[in-house]
């Protein structure tokens, strides 16, 4: 049984569905008889089927409304307790309105809040924590969206096996927008790069996805210490902030 009293739009939609169901059932029953009638009589018969289905749906909806009106307060609360909860209690349960993070937000790849896919486990190097991409064709990281707009992403990148870093050959995206990375500094094997993307305005608490899709390399060395993994770009840390 449906409680239609609080929402007349829902009642109208359900009544229309009832009418459609009744008409379908009646056409199946009356179909063989209608087929034996001449065209004009058949049109009148089909009209009667639709009218009877409409009236039947209204009667069914009214019956449900009568049942709903007869419910006790306890029964109504059991079906849908929300309308009986005071507004101040509902507001308190919802908690304070979420505010977008102001940024900048930075963390290294060994941090607990690092959430991504397609990366090898974090490892410690002489330059700090590092995660290699390459476990899948694409590697992703979830970042706070900071409300969207113009966002700058700064990355500490490293190429595997001593390969030179060719930024033009790297494909890094933020929510599907390609970041044209520029080199900020180079410290040994680690390159600090940054790029800007302009996202649409996003609600507080929304996340954005950084995606790395570049070449993968294999270790040119031989012998028992050879790294058998196929590695892409390595990531040490990253930062996201609003671009000035």
Image (cartoon, rainbow, N blue to C red):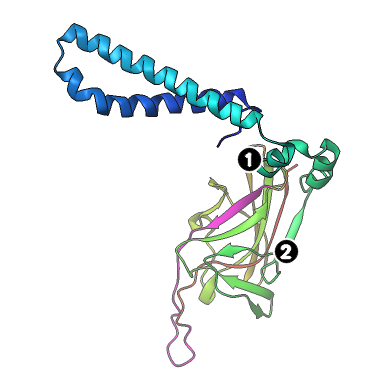
Classify 230 as above or below 147: below
Residue 88 placed where, x, y %?
A: 86, 38
Instruction: Give residue 198's mark.
Output: 1
Residue found 49% across the figure and 72% down from its top: 231
Q: How crowded is mark 1: few (under 14 residues within 10 Å), some or many (20 or more)?
A: some
Q: For this rendering, which residue is in front, 180 or 24? A: 24
Classify 181 as above or below 107: above
Classify 53 as above or below 213: above
Q: Quadrant of residue 113?
A: bottom right
- Locate residue 9 relative to residue 78 in the image: left or right: left
Residue found 35% across the figure and 24% down from its top: 23
Q: For this rendering, which residue is in front, 142 or 124? A: 142
Q: Is mark 2 on a helix, strand or loop?
A: strand
- Locate residue 47 relative to residue 105 in the image: left or right: left
Residue 116 placed where, x, y %?
A: 59, 63
Mark 2–mark 1 contact, CB under 8 Å? no
Residue 104 placed where, x, y %?
A: 77, 52
Q: Residues within 10 Å of mark 2 (few under 14, many from 20)?
A: some
Magenta stretch: residue 219 in it? yes
Residue found 58% across the figure and 75% down from its top: 121
Instruction: Give residue 80's mark.
Output: none
The quadrant the C terminus occupies is top right
Q: For this rendering, which residue is in front, 213 or 68? A: 68
Residue 90 placed where, x, y %?
A: 80, 41
* Residue labelled with disc 2: 107
Q: Quadrant of residue 236?
A: bottom right
Marks 2 and 1, Cα distance to the nearest angstrom?
22 Å
Segment colored magenta: 206-227
């Amino acid at each position: 049984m449906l409680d239609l009293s609080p929402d007349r739009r829902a009642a109208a939609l359900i009544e229309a569905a009832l009418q459609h169901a009744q008409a379908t059932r009646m056409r199946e029953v009356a179909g063989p008889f209608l087929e034996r009638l001449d065209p004009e009589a058949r049109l009148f018969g089909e009209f009667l089927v639709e009218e009877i289905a409409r009236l039947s749906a209204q009667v069914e909806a009214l019956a449900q409304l009568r049942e709903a009106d007869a419910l006790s307060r306890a029964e109504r609360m059991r079906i849908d307790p929300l309308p009986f909860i005071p507004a101040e209690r509902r507001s308190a349960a919802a908690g304070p309105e979420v505010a977008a993070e102001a940024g900048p937000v930075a963390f290294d790849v060994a941090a607990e809040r690092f959430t991504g896919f397609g990366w090898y486990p974090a490892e410690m190097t002489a330059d700090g924590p590092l995660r290699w991409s390459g476990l899948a064709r694409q590697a992703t990281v979830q970042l706070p969206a900071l409300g969207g707009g113009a966002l700058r992403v700064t990355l500490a990148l490293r190429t595997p096996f001593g390969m030179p870093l060719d930024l033009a050959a790297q494909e890094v995206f933020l929510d599907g927008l390609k970041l044209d990375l520029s080199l900020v500094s180079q410290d040994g094997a680690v390159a600090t790069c940054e790029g800007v993307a302009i996202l649409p305005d996003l609600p507080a608490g929304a996340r954005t996805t950084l995606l790395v899709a570049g070449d993968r390399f294999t270790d040119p060395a031989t012998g028992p210490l050879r790294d058998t993994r196929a590695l892409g770009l390595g990531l040490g840390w990253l930062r996201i902030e609003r671009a000035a």
